[in-house]
Amino acid sequence: MDKEKVTAKTKWVWTDLAEQKNPNHSRSGDPIWHHFQKDAPKEWLDQGLIIDASDVVKEGQMSIFDY
């Protein structure tokens, strides 16, 4: 695995691509593994597997945290 890390503004979450590649362990919009939520391998970002939670466009019903 790539030693270079990237730091999230908020936390890293899985993308649609990650869910397509590994549907048993990655669900789009869900936080990535807890030990990588703030600092994750740059390779995952380069491959489009993760995105910062603040950049995710949410669809559907609002939650109390959206207010």
Image (cartoon, rainbow, N blue to C red):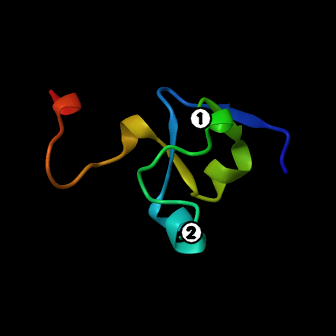
Asked where in the image residue 16 lies, by quadrant, the reply is bottom left
Residue 18, percent from left and from top = 55, 63
| Rendered position, 19 above or below 42 | below
Toward the viewer: 65 or 58? 65
Q: Quadrant of the C terminus?
A: top left
Amino acid type at mark 1: Gln
Which residue in the structure is indicated by mark 1?
Answer: 37
**Residue occupying image coordinates x 50% and y 43%:** 31
Toward the viewer: 46 or 29? 29
Check whether the beta carbons of the residues at disc 2 and disc 1 lie within 8 A of each other: no
Residue 34, percent from left and from top = 61, 36
**Residue occupying image coordinates x 85% and y 51%:** 1
| SS of the residue under disc 1 | loop
Amino acid type at mark 2: Asn
Residue 19, percent from left and from top = 51, 66
| SS of the residue under disc 2 | loop
Residue 24: which disc?
Answer: 2
Asked where in the image residue 55 lies, by quadrant, the reply is top left
Which tag is nearer the camera, tag 2 or tag 1? 2
Label 2 to label 1: alpha-carbon separation: 19 Å
